[in-house]
Image (spheres, grey):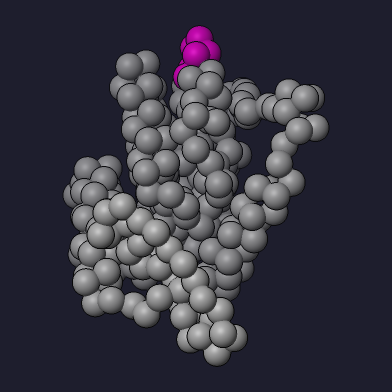
Amino acid sequence: MTFGAGLNDVSVSKTIEKAFSFRKLSAVVLIINSPGGSPAQSSLIAARIKRLAKKNKTHVLAFCEDVAASGGYWLACAADEIFADENTIIGSIGVISSGFGFHELIERQGIERRVYTSGEDKSILDPFRPQKQADIKKLKKLQGQIHENFISHVKLSRGEKIKSEDIFSGEFWLANEALNKGLIDGVGHLEDVISTRFGDTCKLIKVSSKKSFFGRLTGSVYNSLIETVANKINLSRYGL
């Protein structure tokens, strides 16, 4: 199974279930190439993988390509073992929110913005109004809670393999240093690891989600563009 950016649990659920449905299954392999995304979706997908692995008593291996960072690493931690290429970027265990402030711009342009709400906090972090310290405090509290959930997930998955608490700072590393810190289990490629582990006769079956012809025709170009741009922005944080 291949996991990139912009995934959600609903879109991959059938693919994941299919991957665990084969008879005489030696292992399920996850291909991770993601700079991150929604923490909730990362958590939901990872939980689904772990439930099925436990139910079917199946070993799960993750292979990371360009990047497995933030939500991408959250997904990788659903596996029993994590491998990566020596040039793969690993880590970024943290939470980030970003945006822009436009209130001075619209004032200079003589634009009056009208907002009507029910609930005093409904317009929290409105980019067209000056920042409020109370809003920033609220956001940082939410970020802190999500970060703690992320840390708990990694600790539960990696256990005693973790060599240092500094891996939770949001920093990221190349594979060899990630290996030294206990973030991954080995530096290697899919075919080599599978051949060594299960023998040359082991057959790899690729499982991926497919859209119907109608779905491909009617898929939103706008949403695809937004996802692509967001993914490029996320990748640019890692120099990719």
Instruction: Residue at 25%, 59% (x, y): give it.
Output: 120
Image position of 33 (left or right of 138): right
Above or below for 23 versus 62? above
Instruction: Residue at 58%, 70% (x, y): give it.
Output: 236
Instruction: Residue at 55%, 25% (x, y): give it.
Output: 15
Give the residues in magenta. 19-25
For the residue pair 223 and 107, the one nearer the viewer reads as 107
In terms of secondary structure, what is the magenta stretch mainly?
loop
Instruction: Residue at 55%, 49% (x, y): give it.
Output: 5
Farthest residue, direction top: 23
Q: Is residue 23 magenta?
A: yes
Farthest residue, direction bottom: 108
Quadrant of the drawing holding the N terminus: top right
**Where residue 169 sits: x, y (%)?**
28, 69
Quadrant of the drawing holding the C terminus: bottom right
Q: How many marks?
A: 0
Above or below for 35 versus 210? below
Image position of 16 (left or right of 224): left
For the residue pair 92 and 185, the one nearer the viewer reads as 92
Q: Is residue 29 magenta?
A: no
Examine the rendering and report whether any part of residue 203 can be seen.
yes
**Where residue 60 sits: x, y (%)?**
41, 32
**Where residue 194 sits: x, y (%)?**
53, 35
For the residue pair 44 and 80, the one nearer the viewer reads as 44
**Where residue 214 sits: x, y (%)?**
77, 25
Examine the rendering and report whether any part of residue 188 can be seen.
no
For the residue pair 145 and 193, the one nearer the viewer reads as 145
